[in-house]
C-alpha cells in the first residue's frame, strides 16, 4: 500500500478520492436496496405491523388508506425503479473506475519507458534489456492489478460493512452468528494462501524476465541458431520459462476462484443455522419471514462481496512484488535534467581543439578504473586514430567523448569550455558510427534520418549524407531506392552496405566531429578498404576519431595513438 503513491500524479490521487466517495454512496444504495426487500416481504406478510413502524416523515394515514393490492403494486413499481437507478449508478461508477485505472496504466507505462530512455547511459550498461522490457510490458500492468485489487477491497468492504450494520439493527443475534462464521472462514482462507501467493508473484516476475531474455536472444541470433542447429535448445529454454510463468499464474487463478465455492457452503450453513435458532427460540413464522428474507438478500449480495474481498486480497498478495518493483524503479532511476535554453545557445562550437584533461573513469561494479588519467588534444579538422587491444578502454574513451559517460575525474573541453556546460549541444555536433549498426526494419530513408518523424525529414540532408557515404551507386540498383526496406536489423543488406548506411546516418545532421568505434572490424579487407575510402573523403571537412584494433584501418589518420590498460602509451 505504501508504494501506491509512487504511481499516482496529484490529479490521479484526487480522482481516486472521488472514486472512494462514490463507493460510499454506492454502499448506501446497496443498504437501502437490501432493506427495501425485507420491508416488501413484511408488507406482504404483516402490512399493519409495517405501517405502524413507518418513520414520522412518511404519511402513515395515507398509506393505510390504500387497499393491500394497490399498495403492493405501487411498492413493487417503486422498488423496480429504485433498483434500475441504483444499478445505473453502479455501472457509471464502474465505468469511472475503469477509465481512471486505464489512465493510470497508460501514464505509468509511458512514464517508465521515458525514465529508461532518459536515465544515465551507465545504467543501461548494468541492466539486461529483457528485464527493462518486462518491467514496461508486464510489471506496470501487474502493479495496476494491485491497485485495482485495493479499490475492489475498499468497495466490497464498505458494502459488507453497511449490510452488517443493517442486519445488526434488525437482529443482532442472527447477524453475529452468520457473519462471524463467514468472516472466520474468509480470514482462515486468506491466511492459508497469502504467503504462497506473494512468493509466487515474485517468482512469476523473475520468470517473465527470463522468458523475454530467451525470446530476444533466440530471435536476435536466429541466423547462428539455424546455422548451428540450436533450435531445440532455444525452444526448450523458452518452454521451461513459459511453463514456470504459467505454473505460478495458474495457482493465482485457481486461488481466486475458490473463495466463492467455499463461502457458498458457509452461507447456506448460516441460513440453516438461523432457521435452527428461530426454532430453538420458538419464534413465530410471521416474524421469521421478513428476517429470513433480509438475510437471504443480504447473503446474495454478501457472498459476492466476501468473494471479491478474498479475490482482491489474493490479487494484492500476488502482485505486491510488481508494485514494489515499479515503485523502486521510479524512486531510484532519475531522468538527466534538461538543459536551460540559454545554456544551449551559449554552448561552444568546435573551432580549435577538443581536449581530454586527466580523465579517470571506473564502472560502478568494477574493481579497477577503465581509464586512468587520459590526456589528449585533438585539433579541429584532424583525423586521429586510437588503437589498442581488447579491454584497453577504447570504447569507454569513446563513450566519454560522446558525453554518454561522465568522468569521475578530469574533463572534456571544447575550445577551453567543459562540454557539461551544454552536453546536448556538444552531442549535436557529433556523428557516431558504432561497430554494430542498429538498423530499423524500415526504409533506407528512415534509417538514415533515424528517429525523426516523416514530415520532419530533410530529404536534401538525406541525399547529401547518402552521397558522402558513397551509397548513391548502390541505391541506383534498387527499384525503390531510398524507399527500399532493409529487413530486420538490415538482414537484406551486406555488411558493407549496413556500415555505409550507418555512416550516412552519422552524417545526416552534418556533424563537426565523426567518431567511429570499431566500425569496420567485422568487414572483410576489400569492404573495409571501400568504407575507409569513403571516410578518407571526409577528411578536412570535419574532425575524425577512429577506434580500431587493426592499424591498417587507421592508415588514413594524421596520427595514431595507443591505449593500453586505460592509459595512452607509446607504441611497443
Image (cartoon, rainbow, N blue to C red):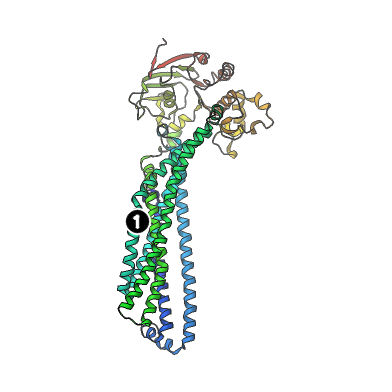
Apparent side of residue 328 relative to residue 71 in the rendered image (left or right): left
Taking 379 as reference, is 300 above or below it?
Answer: below
Task: Kindly identify the residue that appears in the image at 43 percent across and 25 percent down.
Answer: 401
Taking 266 as reference, is 484 above or below it?
Answer: above
Q: Nearer the viewer, residue 367 or 219?
A: 219
Residue bearing the label numbered 1: 190
Q: Quadrant of the C terminus?
A: top left
Q: Nearer the viewer, residue 294 or 331?
A: 294
Look at the numbered disc 1 and give the secondary structure of its residue.
helix
The spot of residue 80 in percent (x, y) is 49, 75
Apparent side of residue 46 relative to residue 232 in the rendered image (left or right): left
Task: Kindly identify the residue that appears in the image at 54 percent across and 36 percent down.
Answer: 451
The spot of residue 546 in percent (x, y) is 49, 20
The spot of residue 460 in percent (x, y) is 62, 31
Taking 128 as reference, is 540 above or below it?
Answer: above
Q: Is residue 20 visible?
A: no
Amino acid at each position: 500500500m505504501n508504494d501506491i503513491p509512487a504511481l499516482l500524479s496529484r490529479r490521479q490521487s484526487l480522482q481516486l478520492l472521488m472514486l472512494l466517495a462514490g463507493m460510499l454512496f454506492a454502499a448506501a444504495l446497496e443498504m437501502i436496496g437490501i432493506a427495501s426487500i425485507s420491508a416488501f416481504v413484511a408488507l406482504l406478510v404483516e402490512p399493519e405491523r409495517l405501517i405502524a413502524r413507518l418513520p414520522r416523515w412518511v404519511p402513515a394515514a395515507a398509506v393505510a388508506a390504500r387497499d393491500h393490492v394497490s399498495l403492493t403494486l405501487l411498492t413493487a413499481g417503486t422498488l423496480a425503479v429504485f433498483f434500475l437507478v441504483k444499478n445505473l449508478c453502479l455501472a457509471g461508477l464502474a465505468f469511472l473506475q475503469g477509465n481512471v485505472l486505464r489512465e493510470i496504466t497508460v501514464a505509468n507505462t509511458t512514464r517508465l519507458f521515458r525514465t529508461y530512455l532518459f536515465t544515465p547511459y551507465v545504467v543501461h550498461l548494468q541492466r539486461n534489456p529483457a528485464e527493462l522490457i518486462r518491467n514496461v510490458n508486464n510489471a506496470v500492468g501487474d502493479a495496476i492489478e494491485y491497485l485495482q485489487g485495493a479499490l475492489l477491497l475498499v468497495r466490497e468492504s464498505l458494502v459488507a460493512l453497511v449490510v452488517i450494520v443493517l442486519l445488526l439493527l434488525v437482529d443482532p443475534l442472527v447477524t453475529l452468528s452468520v457473519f462471524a462464521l463467514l468472516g472466520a472462514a474468509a480470514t482462515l482462507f486468506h491466511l492459508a494462501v497469502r504467503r504462497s501467493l506473494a512468493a509466487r508473484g515474485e517468482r512469476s516476475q523473475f520468470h517473465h524476465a527470463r522468458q523475454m531474455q530467451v525470446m530476444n536472444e533466440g530471435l536476435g541470433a536466429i541466423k547462428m541458431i539455424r546455422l548451428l542447429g540450436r533450435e531445440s535448445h532455444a525452444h526448450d529454454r523458452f518452454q521451461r520459462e513459459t511453463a514456470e510463468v504459467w505454473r505460478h499464474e495458474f495457482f493465482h487463478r485457481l486461488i481466486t476462484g475458490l473463495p466463492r465455492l467455499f463461502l457458498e457452503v458457509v452461507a447456506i450453513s448460516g441460513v440453516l443455522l438461523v432457521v435452527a435458532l428461530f426454532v430453538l427460540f420458538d419464534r413465530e413464522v410471521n416474524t421469521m419471514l421478513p428476517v429470513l428474507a433480509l438475510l437471504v438478500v443480504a447473503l446474495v449480495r454478501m457472498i459476492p462481496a466476501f468473494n471479491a474481498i478474498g479475490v482482491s486480497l489474493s490479487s494484492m498478495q500476488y502482485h505486491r512484488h510488481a508494485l514494489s518493483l515499479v515503485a523502486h524503479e521510479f524512486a531510484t532511476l532519475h531522468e538527466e535534467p534538461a538543459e536551460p535554453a540559454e545554456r544551449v545557445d551559449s554552448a561552444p562550437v568546435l573551432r580549435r581543439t577538443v581536449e581530454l584533461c586527466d580523465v579517470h573513469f571506473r564502472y560502478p561494479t568494477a574493481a579497477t578504473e577503465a581509464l586512468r588519467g587520459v590526456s589528449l588534444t585533438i585539433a579541429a579538422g584532424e583525423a586521429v586514430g586510437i588503437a589498442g587491444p581488447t579491454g584497453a578502454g577504447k570504447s569507454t574513451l569513446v563513450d566519454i567523448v560522446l558525453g554518454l559517460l561522465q568522468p569521475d575525474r578530469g574533463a572534456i573541453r571544447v575550445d577551453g569550455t567543459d562540454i557539461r556546460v551544454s552536453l546536448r549541444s556538444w552531442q549535436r555536433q557529433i556523428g557516431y558510427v558504432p561497430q554494430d549498426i542498429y538498423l530499423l526494419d524500415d526504409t533506407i530513408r528512415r534509417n538514415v534520418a533515424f528517429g525523426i518523424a516523416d514530415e520532419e525529414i530533410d530529404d536534401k540532408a538525406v541525399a547529401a549524407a547518402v552521397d558522402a557515404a558513397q551509397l548513391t551507386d548502390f541505391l541506383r540498383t534498387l527499384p525503390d531506392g531510398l524507399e527500399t526496406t532493409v529487413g530486420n536489423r538490415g538482414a537484406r543488406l551486406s555488411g558493407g552496405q549496413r556500415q555505409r548506411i550507418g555512416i550516412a546516418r552519422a552524417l545526416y545532421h552534418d556533424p563537426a566531429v565523426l567518431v567511429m568505434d570499431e566500425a569496420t572490424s567485422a568487414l572483410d579487407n576489400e569492404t573495409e578498404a571501400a568504407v575507409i575510402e569513403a571516410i578518407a573523403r571526409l577528411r578536412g571537412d570535419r574532425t575524425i576519431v577512429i577506434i580500431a584494433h587493426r592499424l591498417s584501418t587507421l592508415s588514413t589518420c594524421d596520427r595514431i595513438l595507443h591505449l593500453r590498460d586505460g592509459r595512452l602509451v607509446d607504441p611497443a
